[in-house]
Image (tube, rainbow, N blue to C red):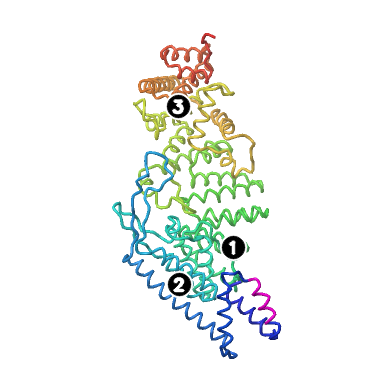
């Protein structure tokens, strides 16, 4: 209940009270007044004793109070404008106790406020609250809007950035419950503007406030009065946000169509704003999925794939939802086309393997997928990429290790080795595909089905590096799994391996390269005594030994590990890592 509402209720009650009842109330209330405030109470009581009060006194006093508040707002606004112009500034001072070489909890800089900027801003925030309390919503909104938009200059030897209201709160230059203040400003924006101007007013507050928690639903829940004509506003709000293509609009548009809870309105918005907000189609498809509207879901899903630009990753989500609808209707051909479209818009390892392993015509899909990823990584495509890298318009722009992975799973081993594993140095492998490539080839040439210590580490290394997820693979298939990501990947790998074969000559050539790379890596690590990489070296050695043994070499793993143990006989820490991956413990007890 704000001040205006409170005073109206008080006036309504006192108007019907007799003098005796009022005197009894004052007597009773006076007993509850604490000693420090009793003098002030008596002064105010004495003031009204000798004052002539007419019937319009209360209304006149309310007007005077509101006019006084308006004057306070004007005065504060002039101070804030001085700050925003750069005439008044904060001073940045380096914290001598800060040490960038350690994980210091201290801030690198602190800020002095010789010109009382914090005091003026704090006053402004209090006045926004007072305006809302007195139902001076327009004045409160305009002041809040200025507070969020203003820049506070910071002077210092190191050229600090300008501060926002949020920065002042973070650095404790003002004391403010920031998220509560944002909601109060939104309420003032809603009530302080006529309906046609409300959407822009709320958007300005949200854009400049950079709040992580504010939402229209929270405004509805915490508003002191019900938001009038809300359905009408929601329609205008959706239309306003649909024409803006930034992350703020994306976030609050998704919320708005959810609050509307009208499937037809959601579909209409998806069709109207596809270019800027393709994610609305995904919201619509998820609604159809939740309500088991399979036929409608398939129809709208196909429409979404036609209308959403293939370059946007979110189209892949639409494709996988559509594939599920198709499978529910036993339309496998449509599902397989959707899996291909999912790969076209998000060329991930999971989307590729699903295409190869789940489609009946895997070879035909392989050729189409090859055209997609080859074009994606062409020089022309690279020159165009990168305009949108976040949000619902994030573009399909996978990193180069994904390209190297696709070359491997496409069976183009020679091209992978030439372009992705041509490292001639033992060190500096981070950021290259050397470790992932070694892991994949060692898994490929291992002829067993149950992984041993080295193979398990190769599987873990690759899955961890590319962030392979079984859930991502199973999206669009209508299935799930209880297996962890590594176990599921190995199952997929075994199925994939059955369809890839190379000549014995090519096999021997690649195995020779693997042995040379591992030897080079171990020698480089040992020469520099990089103990942190002893475990990695032991894993590669173990996996290579397991490959040898699986291909018919008797005790191939044990022999190889012993060769390396003997070569580095004084490296006991290295020996311990070799034992972790299966080398026999021959130490004397």
Dot 1 corresponds to which residue? 217
**Image quadrant where residue 378 sits:** top left
Q: Marks 3 and 2: CB-CB under 8 Å?
A: no
Which of marks 3 and 1 precedes in the sequence?
Answer: 1
Q: Which residue is mark 2?
A: 142
> Residue 438's mark?
3
Q: Is residue 27 magenta?
A: yes
Q: How many marks?
A: 3
* Eye-nearest disc, 2 or 1: 2
Q: Kindly tell me whether residue 275 is visible in this rendering.
A: no
**Vertical order, 323 against 517 (above or below):** below
Which span of residues is magenta-colored? 23-32
Query: Where does the image place residue 61, in percent across and percent down from the top left?
Result: 54, 84
506 is higher (above) or lower (below) than 488: above
Image position of 522 with respect to 266: above or below:
above
Mark 2 or mark 1: name the one nearer the start of the chain. 2
Badge 2 crowding class, 10 Å Cα cut-off, few under 14, some 14 to 19, many 20 or more, is some
- Residue occupying the point 59% across, 68% down: 223
- Mark nearest the camera among 1 and 3 is 1
- Comparing 540 with 153, the one in front is 153
Residue 178: assigned label: none
* SS state under label 1: helix
């Amino acid at each position: 209940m704000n001040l205006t509402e409170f005073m109206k209720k008080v006036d309504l009650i006192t108007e019907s009270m007799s003098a005796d009842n009022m005197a009894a109330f004052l007597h009773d209330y006076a007993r509850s007044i604490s000693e420090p405030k009793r003098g002030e109470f008596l002064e105010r009581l004495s003031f009204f004793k000798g004052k002539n009060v007419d019937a319009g006194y209360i209304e006149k006093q309310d007007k005077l109070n509101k006019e006084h508040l308006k004057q306070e707002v004007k005065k504060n606004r002039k101070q804030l404008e001085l700050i925003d112009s750069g005439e008044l500034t904060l001073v940045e001072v380096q914290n001598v106790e800060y040490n960038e070489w350690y994980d210091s909890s201290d801030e690198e800089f602190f800020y002095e406020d010789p010109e009382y900027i914090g005091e003026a801003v704090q006053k402004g925030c209090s006045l926004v609250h007072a305006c809302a309390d007195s139902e001076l919503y327009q004045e409160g909104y305009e002041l809040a809007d200025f507070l969020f938009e203003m820049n506070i200059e910071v002077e210092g030897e190191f050229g600090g950035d300008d501060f926002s209201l949020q920065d002042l709160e973070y650095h404790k230059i003002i004391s403010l419950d920031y998220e509560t203040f944002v909601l109060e400003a939104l309420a003032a924006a809603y009530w302080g503007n006529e309906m046609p101007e409300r959407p822009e007013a709320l958007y300005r507050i949200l854009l400049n406030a950079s709040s992580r928690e504010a939402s229209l639903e929270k405004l509805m829940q915490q508003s002191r009065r019900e938001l009038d004509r809300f359905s009408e506003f929601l329609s205008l709000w959706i239309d306003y946000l649909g024409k803006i293509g930034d992350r703020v609009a994306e976030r609050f548009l998704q919320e708005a169509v959810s609050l509307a809870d009208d499937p037809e309105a959601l579909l209409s918005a998806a069709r109207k704003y596809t270019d800027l907000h393709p994610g609305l189609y995904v919201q619509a498809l998820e609604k159809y999925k939740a309500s088991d509207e399979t036929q409608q879901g398939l129809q709208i899903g196909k429409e979404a794939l036609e209308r959403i630009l293939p370059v946007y990753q979110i189209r892949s989500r639409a494709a996988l939802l559509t594939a599920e609808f198709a499978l529910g209707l036993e339309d496998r051909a449509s599902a397989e086309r959707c899996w291909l479209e999912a790969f076209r818009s998000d060329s991930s390892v999971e989307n590729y393997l699903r295409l190869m392993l789940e489609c009946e015509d895997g070879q035909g899909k392989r050729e189409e997928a090859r055209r997609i990823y080859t074009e994606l990584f062409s020089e022309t495509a690279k020159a165009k990429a990168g305009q949108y890298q976040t949000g619902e318009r994030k573009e399909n722009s996978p990193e180069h290790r994904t390209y190297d992975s696709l070359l491997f799973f496409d069976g183009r081993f020679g091209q992978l080795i030439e372009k992705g594993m041509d490292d001639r140095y033992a060190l500096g492998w981070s950021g290259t595909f050397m470790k992932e490539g070694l892991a994949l080839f060692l898994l490929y040439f291992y002829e067993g089905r149950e992984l041993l210590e080295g193979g398990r580490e190769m599987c873990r290394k690759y899955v961890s590096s590319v962030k392979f997820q079984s859930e991502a693979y199973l999206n669009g298939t209508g299935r799930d799994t209880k297996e962890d990501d590594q176990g599921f990947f190995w199952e997929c790998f075994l199925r994939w391996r059955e369809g890839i074969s190379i000549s014995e000559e090519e096999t021997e050539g690649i195995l020779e390269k693997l042995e040379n790379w591992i030897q080079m890596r171990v020698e480089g690590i040992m020469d520099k005594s990089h103990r942190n990489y002893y475990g990695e070296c032991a894993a590669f050695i173990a996996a290579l030994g397991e490959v040898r043994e699986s291909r018919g070499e008797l005790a191939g793993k044990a022999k190889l590990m012993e060769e390396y143990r003997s070569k580095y006989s004084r490296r006991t820490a290295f020996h311990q890592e070799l034992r972790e991956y299966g080398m026999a413990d021959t130490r004397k007890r």
